[in-house]
Amino acid sequence: MAAAPLISPALASLGDLRPHTGLLTTDELEQLAVDIYDRGEIWEPLVRTDAEERRYELIYEDELLDAWVLSWMPGQGTGFHDHYISGVGLCCARGGVREDLLVYGGPDLELQLRPGDTRQGGPGYIHRVRHQVGEPAVTIHVYSPRLDWVGQYRLGENGLVRREVRPGRNEL
């Protein structure tokens, strides 16, 4: 008997949004995030308000990609991380978030994302995302291949930066 999945997707298929037979490019991932954003009936029922922890709900997954809706409240965010071998496309759907890009030898690059704003990154793209405005702020994230692993960056003793590989379905 097969074990039940830990997280069940909201959709059994992406239907007419993005038929695919292979991995998606970052441009395709970004467009798919916009396509999902444009269809509020897909993501709006999955929005969660939780002051204690950032919430993420699975919209869809197959062996080539997964799509998520993330709900962010004040004080919530990720640390710096990468998406291991996965590319990402994301779209801000409600409120606003701030994306920080790590800059060697200088201050982090800060990007403000509001509804309809998008971003993309290939494997190894290092960033962090934080709530900025709205209760909750909401973002749509699409990964290909599926986000099974992430690299989290931690500041260790003597200021050394460590990268820890973690399962992609855990809180960052």
Image (cartoon, rainbow, N blue to C red):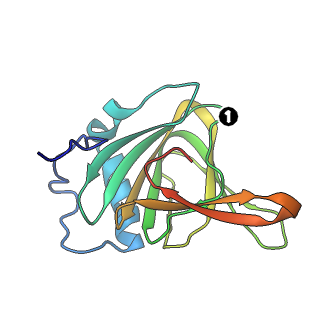
Q: Residue furthest front?
A: 1
Say which quarter of the image contains residue 8. top left
Q: Is residue 12 above or below residue 51?
A: below
Question: Residue 127 at what x, y percent from top left?
Answer: 62, 61
User: Circle 1 sits on which residue?
Assistant: 75
Q: Is residue 128 above or below residue 70?
A: below
Q: Residue at x 37, y 55 (%)?
A: 33
Q: Is residue 72 above or below residue 129?
A: above
The reply, left or right, for residue 95 in relation to residue 100 is left
Q: Between residue 95 and residue 54, name the one nearer to us.
A: 54
Q: Residue at x 32, y 56 (%)?
A: 66
Question: Residue 136 at what x, y percent from top left?
Answer: 53, 31
The reply, left or right, for residue 35 in relation to residue 123 is left
Question: Residue 160 at what x, y percent from top left?
Answer: 81, 66
Q: Between residue 93 and residue 77, name the one nearer to us.
A: 77
Q: Between residue 17 and residue 51, name the one nearer to us.
A: 51
Residue type for callout 1:
Gly
Q: Is residue 160 above or below residue 35?
A: below
Q: Residue furthest left?
A: 1
Q: Residue at x 34, y 52 (%)?
A: 67
Question: Residue 78 at what x, y percent from top left?
Answer: 61, 48
